[in-house]
Image (cartoon, rainbow, N blue to C red):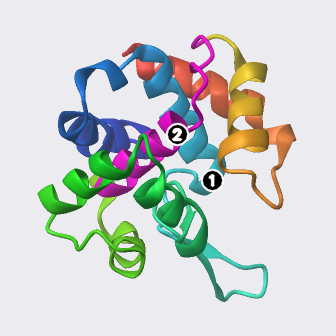
Amino acid sequence: MSCVSAAIAIAIDAAFALLPDRMDTQAARVALIAIGLQESGLKDRCQKLANGGRGPAHGLWQFERAGGVVGVLTHGTTRKLAFDACKARGVAAESSAAWAALEHDDVLAAAFARLLLWSDGKPLPAEDDAEGLWRTYALRTWRPGKPHPEAWAANHAAARAAAAV
């Protein structure tokens, strides 16, 4: 099973089971897969630094404690859903505990990734709109320090193919 297939079968499907049905769309699945591929290759659960050390981001979607984790736990549209997801996964709904859990709990990580997208307040771009999803990811939600736009088209195409299965 490929890392993308495993992420879908294990993490993404289970995460959507924790969230309201309206959050589970084809565009959301493409977004989660593309962003996961962009952030970690859907393999690395802790950010790897160039010097071989560990960075501050955890989980397949690479959340930093003081960034995305706090954002999802405190945003008005995601707070209750994040607390419910944490409870369902047996994790305290506070930033340090959730951030630590994301390194090992792919389901919680996928739920937080979907919630971060939800907090944007704008509709997700259509599943075939790679540029629109890039803007959502790189400019409004994750805002990576080193975004690597050269990898996005391939990651988006792979996500579309995987989500179609």
Residue at figure coordinates x 86%, y 39% from the top left: 150
Tell me the quadrant of the picture where the N terminus can be found.
top left
Badge number at residue 92 = none
Residue at x-position 13% and y-position 56%: 88
Q: Position of residue 68 (x, y in %)?
A: 55, 59
Task: Please tell me which residue is depicted at 77% across the width and 87% down the height of the picture.
Answer: 51
Residue at disc 2, secondary structure:
helix
The mark that comes first in sequence, 1 or 2, is: 1
Relative placement, left or right, of 56 versus 23 is right
What is the span of residues highlighted in magenta in the rendered image? 108-127
Amino acid at the residue labelled 1:
Glu
Local SS, label 1: helix
Q: Which residue is mark 1?
A: 39
Q: Which residue is mark 2?
A: 119
Residue 45 pos. (x, y %): 47, 67
Q: Is residue 28 above or below residue 54?
A: above
Foreground residue among 66 and 159: 66
- Residue 109 falls in image quadrant: bottom left
**Residue 132 in which image quadrant:** top right
Q: Is residue 58 magenta?
A: no
On screen, residue 14 versus residue 2, left or right, reads left
From the viewer's perspective, tell me whether residue 61 is left or right of residue 136: left
Residue 43: x and y in percent read 49, 58
